[in-house]
Amino acid sequence: MHEESGPSWGMRGLRKWLSTAPETRDELLKLVQDSRRFLEPDTVAMLEGVLDLPATKVREVMTPRTSMISLQEDDQLLDILHTLIESAHSRFPVFSSDQPDNVVGILLAKDLLPFLTERSNKVDIRTLMRQPIFVPESARSDQVLRMLKNTQTHIAVVIDEYGTTSGLVTLEDILEEIVGEIEDEHDKVDEEAQFIIPDNDPQTANTWLVQALTPIEHFNNVLDADFSDDEVETVGGLLLQEMGLVSDLQGQIIELENWEFTIVEADARTIHLIRAVRK
């Protein structure tokens, strides 16, 4: 009697397993999750990411306005070059000088190369910038991915219901939802060093300096805390939610559970740096 080989048996099992077509997205997702015996874990994770895209709103993957690295349409060349070098980005949203909440174009770093050989420091970036693509916060990530692909664009400006810029989404942001974090030589890999550092003042114990954009989940993991991220995602958002105001932020002290938070740096509307003390 001829004995079937392993690979042949595996293919027959896979065909039989796939004989009943799923009728809903949830059934298809379960089918993918159950396929771990046939597929590599990374392949399963990517398939799950693809199936989750329609349920992921662009507001969940965008870079918020407060974290955007941008230019003003009347910026001088030396200031622009400083921003390019410091950020190591290749594309920059350009805000209107008259309406500071509105993006009027996208500047590609490569379009500035011809000016680097000129002695003049003057450049009108209005003549260089590209037409921006705008998408609403509520747009589905898969729809934005298709739009970026069809227009051969790498970046889109996210606007809120009032037409004001609320963030920026890139092709890389959406692809990371499928394949996981994409790191390059400019990324800061050490998140703890980036977001949370111990306060070196010998007079203070159990004290850390915390970037306001630190994800609550990361804060909880690093400092063994237990704050909820159901309604807000960052430590700064947590404090704003507790305070209920966005004026006179700097110097405010907020007590939550067994923690005392002091706002060290802030502007009129945004918290930047926080001192966290575990009591």
Image: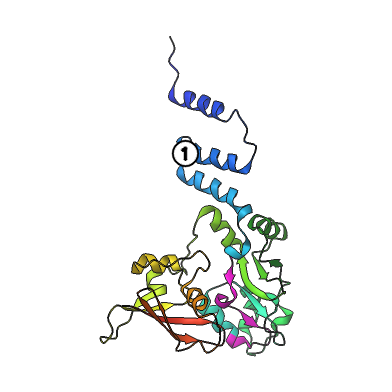
- Looking at the image, is 25 positioned above or below residue 221? above
The quarter of the displayed image where residue 72 is located: bottom right
Q: Secondary structure at mark 1?
A: helix
- Looking at the image, is 236 positioned above or below residue 175? below
Give the camera-side residue of 31 and 91. Answer: 31
Residue under label 1, please give it: 36
Horizontal arrangement in the rendering, residue 258 relative to residue 182 (left or right): left
At horizontal 59% and vertical 39% (from top left) the residue drawn is 27
Residues drawn in magenta: 61-79
User: Hey, what amino acid is under mark 1?
Assistant: Arg
At horizontal 67% and vertical 70% (from top left) the residue drawn is 157
Q: Residues within 10 Å of mark 1 (few under 14, many from 20)?
A: some
Note whether residue 136 is visible: yes
The quarter of the displayed image where residue 194 is located: bottom left
* Quadrant that contains the N terminus: top left
* Quadrant that contains the C terminus: bottom left
Horizontal arrangement in the rendering, residue 105 relative to residue 206 (left or right): right
Toward the top, the furthest residue is 1
Residue 66 highlighted magenta (yes or no) = yes
Residue 88 highlighted magenta (yes or no) = no
Horizontal arrangement in the rendering, residue 40 relative to residue 260 (left or right): right
Q: Whole-percent x and y of residue 202?
A: 25, 85
At horizontal 59% and vertical 48% (from top left) the residue drawn is 51
At horizontal 49% and vertical 24% (from top left) the residue drawn is 8
Q: How many marks?
A: 1
